[in-house]
Amino acid sequence: PITVRLAKADADAGAKTVVGQCVGCHTLKSGEGKKIGPNLYGVVGSAIASKDGFEYSAALGARKAAGERWTFEALDQFLTAPQKAVPNTKMTYNGFAEPLGRANIVAYLRGLSDNPIPLPAP
């Protein structure tokens, strides 16, 4: 489970992955606008499809309407294979197969916040 992997995660390694593979489509700093994808600042723990100024897919909009949030588990599942996790999402990236690599990414994204949510107990 992601909770166990987060206890071992390396946010610095996650930063390298995000900068190397995600910034072509996403911005990371507070207040930055969107690119092809939404800004990721504050995404961990936020409501799904909640970034202002970005037009989300109907599939993510439905999850927002259902009150879903970007929990550690939801991000882990989405990052594994976005199109499988949320069919018809606009995110065309194939995903990150390596479980600890995904935990590293989620650990890094968690830090992109004015008030990072607490890590779950493993």
Image (cartoon, rainbow, N blue to C red):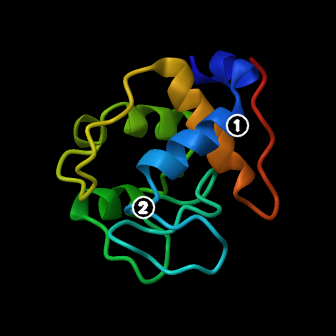
Judged from the image, the secondary structure of the residue bearing numbered disc 1 is helix
Q: Is residue 117 left or right of residue 48?
A: right
Q: Residue at x 42, y 47 (%)?
A: 21
> Would you place residue 99 above or below residue 24 in this image?
above
Q: Which residue is mark 1?
A: 11
Q: Residue at x 52, y 47 (%)?
A: 18
Q: Given the image, on which type of amino acid does mark 1 rest?
A: Ala
Q: Is residue 111 left or right of residue 98?
A: right
Examine the image and state in which quarter residue 40 appears: bottom right
Q: Is residue 93 left or right of residue 22?
A: left
Specify the quadrant that holds the N terminus. Answer: top right
Specify the quadrant that holds the C terminus. Answer: top right
Marks 2 and 1 sit apart, C-alpha to C-alpha, by: 27 Å
Q: Which residue is mark 2?
A: 64
Single out the mark in the foreground, 2 or 1: 1
- Label 2 CA crowd tier, 10 Å (few <14, some 14–19, many 20+): some
Q: Farthest residue toward the left?
A: 88
Q: Residue 55, percent across and down? A: 31, 76
Q: Earlier in the sequence, mark 2 or mark 1?
A: 1
> Would you place residue 114 above or below residue 81 in this image?
below
Closer to us: 65 or 45? 45
